[in-house]
């Protein structure tokens, strides 16, 4: 049986103040992208710091590709982008990455080429000769990514890799991570951004107050049932009742909906007006079915989309009714 890329057994770290993360048992296969999702203070960074050998566990055990964490063998397998990074302001981006390449024992004959490649990859190419003190936060985060990748590690630990970036930067980072995944790297992604985890990861764990509340495939953990939005014309309250009766679903109607802000205030929708309908559905087949019923009733279908839940709301729902240990 091949060894897992990351394997932990009851891994715990308790700081003097009683905080940290407790009893985490997970397995991440080689080439898998694993998301560790949790609100601020959940214990994500603590967990990763143990895996990369920066702090020692209070109890439990863990290995990377079969090598005990904290050993040189385990450390030589990893690239790590910390959450709180500070690079030498007086050096250029290129010099910082070179330094990391040397520290990671990249063969000296290939350092120049590798540094150039990785700076291109993260999108610093033309700014690589500027001093770090002139870099924006987003640029520094890209630099951190270059440092994490320069030694071509088998496992990449990323602690909030796009937190300082604007939407374009975020989407670029996602593309870089996707490419890494396609190259067969194992990726461990700490994030409080639902979207990042959803787009990249195969499996994930939801952490709160230092304990894992759920883990499994991303779809198992995130969406049991999903809300869908249908923008329709030719609406009437009568047609809504008909749809509800026919499908057995609860369907809400609203004149306007701010999807990102997740507001769906009930509408006094007038006959024939354009409205948004919202329904919680189990599967894409149900979406198709509802589409066809909407059109069968003579309504015009302008748009269908999945409603994006805001993370806070999702967390509140996921965590509601749980005590601080995640028990109901
Ligand atoms: N060195 C430390 N000493 C004492 N408590 C700590 C230490 N480091 C972290 N903590 C506490 O442990 C808990 C988990 O922190 P951690 O940084 O691992 O969370 P996180 O999920 O990474 O959150 P964030 O995204 O805000 O960094 C928090 O309550 C934090 O205040």
Image (spheres, rainbow, N blue to C red):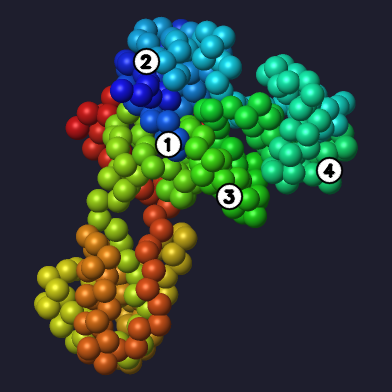
Looking at the picture, does residue 288 appear above or below residue 323?
Answer: below
Image mark for residue 100? none
Which of the two labelled residues, at mark 1 and mark 4, occupies the earlier sequence position? 1
Q: Secondary structure at mark 2?
A: strand
Q: CA distance from mark 4 to mark 2?
A: 41 Å
The spot of residue 278 in percent (x, y) is 30, 69
Which of the two labelled residues, at mark 3 and mark 4, occupies the earlier sequence position? 4
Residue 237 lies left or right of residue 230; in this view the side is left
Task: Tell me the residue that label 2 is attached to.
Answer: 11
Residue positioned 84% across, 43% down in the render: 127
Disc tally is: 4
Q: Which callout, 2 or 3, points to the residue nearer the camera?
A: 3
Question: Who is closer to the viewer here, 236 or 126?
Answer: 126
Q: Which callout, 2 or 1, points to the residue nearer the camera?
A: 1
Question: Who is closer to the viewer here, 43 or 18?
Answer: 43
Task: Tell me the residue that label 3 is attached to.
Answer: 175
Question: Who is closer to the viewer here, 228 or 125?
Answer: 125
Task: Tell me the residue that label 4 is attached to.
Answer: 127
Mark 4 Cβ inside 8 Å of ligand 1: no
């Amino acid at each position: 049986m091949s060894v897992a890329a990351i394997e932990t057994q009851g891994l715990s770290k308790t700081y003097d103040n009683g905080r940290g993360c407790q009893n985490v048992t997970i397995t991440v296969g080689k080439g898998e992208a694993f998301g560790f999702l949790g609100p601020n203070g959940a214990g994500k960074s603590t967990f990763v710091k143990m895996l990369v050998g920066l702090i020692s566990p209070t109890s439990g055990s863990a290995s990377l590709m079969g090598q005990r964490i904290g050993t040189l063998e385990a450390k030589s397998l990893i690239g790590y982008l910390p959450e709180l990074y500070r690079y030498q302001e007086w050096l250029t981006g290129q010099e910082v990455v070179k330094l990391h390449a040397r520290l990671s024992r990249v063969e000296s004959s290939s350092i120049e080429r590798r540094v150039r490649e990785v700076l291109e990859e993260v999108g610093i190419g033309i700014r690589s000769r500027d001093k770090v003190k002139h870099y924006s936060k987003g640029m520094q985060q890209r630099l951190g990514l270059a440092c994490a990748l320069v030694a071509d590690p088998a496992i990449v630990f990323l602690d909030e890799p796009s937190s300082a970036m604007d939407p374009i930067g975020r989407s670029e980072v996602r593309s870089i991570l996707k490419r890494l995944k396609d190259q067969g790297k194992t990726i461990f992604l700490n994030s409080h951004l639902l979207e990042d985890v959803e787009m990249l990861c195969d499996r994930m764990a939801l952490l709160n107050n230092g304990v894992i509340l759920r883990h499994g495939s991303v779809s198992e953990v995130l969406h049991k049932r999903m809300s869908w939005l249908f923008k329709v014309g030719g609406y009437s309250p009568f047609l809504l009742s008909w749809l509800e009766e026919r499908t057995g679903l609860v369907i809400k109607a609203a004149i306007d909906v701010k999807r990102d802000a997740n507001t769906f205030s009930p509408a006094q929708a007038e006959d024939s007006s354009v409205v948004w309908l919202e329904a919680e559905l189990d599967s894409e087949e149900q979406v198709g079915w509802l589409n066809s019923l909407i059109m069968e009733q003579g309504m015009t279908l302008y748009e269908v989309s999945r409603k994006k839940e805001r993370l806070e709301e999702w967390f509140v729902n996921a965590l509601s009714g749980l005590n601080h240990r995640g028990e109901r």
